[in-house]
């Protein structure tokens, strides 16, 4: 029987022209990972034979690991299928960013399946003694702009993942539980409500016409919901994790649309270090530089989402603003953002930052005159004081 995904010569030519990658490896990983569905069913059967609260560490570990494999398999499959549906002319090939993201998800399935089977075969197995749990999803592959099919895939993945997470939560019960267990259930319900609210907000932002600013907000909210349900499933499988200093994932960065350029509450100085703000506001050339920076920003929603991540980390105490030797508090380049130091390991803009690491958010239009793109990135220190001021004048006019 012929392989329905076997590419024709025309398909190969189209894929080569678009620089897409052969998805043969991904399809092999998809097929190998399909056992995640049966593994989750087997684990759930073990759970229904008794209370999740009384489950042995081995049973809890089997359920947790099989849940993780299931979620990752769903995510990989929905993204592959969304790409094929969006571009039927290159079925069997995918863009580089899609290949990278699906590889991250499918590549992690095998490890969790192995853990689930180890727990199933060894009644003394304790997964929590081996791994830091609950685990987070593999890194999101960031690309600007995010392909529409990635958004379609996230939307398709939500219903099955949400349904299974809520079933697991329901299995914990509520009535008649002692206060400490009831508190755990209530906390998980709150997390589930937060995830559901993020999805509802994302769905409410959709419009018939593509809007890159809204696209970014929708994507962030869907990612946050999936992260939460991924952890809810693990915590419902092993509720004792909630008694060992668990910290839920930080809410998705949701920049207020009214604070974006053109919005009623837009502040062009939103990215500037508050401690040096009066200096730059009094500088005519700085005022012009900040104005031009926003004019050249091709995705201000993404810029403000990055700032919102930093603000959330600051509020949580994960980072702190710093002054460097010489009294400097801001980066030398427009829009002169604050400098920070990491107090606890944190992830910002998809990048892990270690304790004591210095960083700032750099936004610049300097590369645009040469045909480049707007820069939006984290710059890490250590920083030093300088008398240099870069006004970043992309149009060459003062």
Image (cartoon, helix red, strand yellow):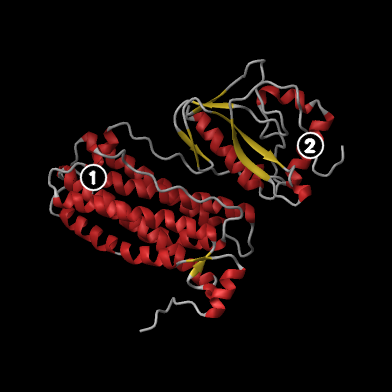
User: Residue 351 in the image: x percent, y percent?
Assistant: 51, 40
Relative side of 67 to 298, left or right: left
User: Residue 201 in the image: x percent, y percent?
Assistant: 51, 52
Which callout, 1 or 2, points at the residue further toward the start of the chain? 1
Residue 170 appears in the rendering:
no
Q: Crowdedness of circle 2 by 10 Å Cα count: few (<14), some, many (20+)?
A: many
Between 159 and 285, the one lying in front of the other is: 285
Q: Residue at x 71, y 22 (%)?
A: 386
Q: From mark 1 to mark 2, how far is it between C-alphas?
A: 58 Å
- Under circle 2, the secondary element is helix
Q: Crowdedness of circle 1 by 10 Å Cα count: few (<14), some, many (20+)?
A: some
Please tell me the numbered disc located at residue 267. none
Q: Residue at x 21, y 44 (%)?
A: 175
Q: If the image is split into quadrants, where does the N terminus sit?
A: bottom left
Please tell me the numbered disc located at residue 174. 1
Q: Residue at x 50, y 60 (%)?
A: 98
Relative to 337, residue 45 above or below: below
Relative to 36, residue 342 above or below: above
Relative side of 104 to 302, left or right: left
Between 160 and 331, the one lying in front of the other is: 331
Relative to 162, residue 360 above or below: above
Please tell me the numbered disc located at residue 289. 2
Q: Residue furthest bottom?
A: 1
Between 271 and 92, the one lying in front of the other is: 92
């Amino acid at each position: 029987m012929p392989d329905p995904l076997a590419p024709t010569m025309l398909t190969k030519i189209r894929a080569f022209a678009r620089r897409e990658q052969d998805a043969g490896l991904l399809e092999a990983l998809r097929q190998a990972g399909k056992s995640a569905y049966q593994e989750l069913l087997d684990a759930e059967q073990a759970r229904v034979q008794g209370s999740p609260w009384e489950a042995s560490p081995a049973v809890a570990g089997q359920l947790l690991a099989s849940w993780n494999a299931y979620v990752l398999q769903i995510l990989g499959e929905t993204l592959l299928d969304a790409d094929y549906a969006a571009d039927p002319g290159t079925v069997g090939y995918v863009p580089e960013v899609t290949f990278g993201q699906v590889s991250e998800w499918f590549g992690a399935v095998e490890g969790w399946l192995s853990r689930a089977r180890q727990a199933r075969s060894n009644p003394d197995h304790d997964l929590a003694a081996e791994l830091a749990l609950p685990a987070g999803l593999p890194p999101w592959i960031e690309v600007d702009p995010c392909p529409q099919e990635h958004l379609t895939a996230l939307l398709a993945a939500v219903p099955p993942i949400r349904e299974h997470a809520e079933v697991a939560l329901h299995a914990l019960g509520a009535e008649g539980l002692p206060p400490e267990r009831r508190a755990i259930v209530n906390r998980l319900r709150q997390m589930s409500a937060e995830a559901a609210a993020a999805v509802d907000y994302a769905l409410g932002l959709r419009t018939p016409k593509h809007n890159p600013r809204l696209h970014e907000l929708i994507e962030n909210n869907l990612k946050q919901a999936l992260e939460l349900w991924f952890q809810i499933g693990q915590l419902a499988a092993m509720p004792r994790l909630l008694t060992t200093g668990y910290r839920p994932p930080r809410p998705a960065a949701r920049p207020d649309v009214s604070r974006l350029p053109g919005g009623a509450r837009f502040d062009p100085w939103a990215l500037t270090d508050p401690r040096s703000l009066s200096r730059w506001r009094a500088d005519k050339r700085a005022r012009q530089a900040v104005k031009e920076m926003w004019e050249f920003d091709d995705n201000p929603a993404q810029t403000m989402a990055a700032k919102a991540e930093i603000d959330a980390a600051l509020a949580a105490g994960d980072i702190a603003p710093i002054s460097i030797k010489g009294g400097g508090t801001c980066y030398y380049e427009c829009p002169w953002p604050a400098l920070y130091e990491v107090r606890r390991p944190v992830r910002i803009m998809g990048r892990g930052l270690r304790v004591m690491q210095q960083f700032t958010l750099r936004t610049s239009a300097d590369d645009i005159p040469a045909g480049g793109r707007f820069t939006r990135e984290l710059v890490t220190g250590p920083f030093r004081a300088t008398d240099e001021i870069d006004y970043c004048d992309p149009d060459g006019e003062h």
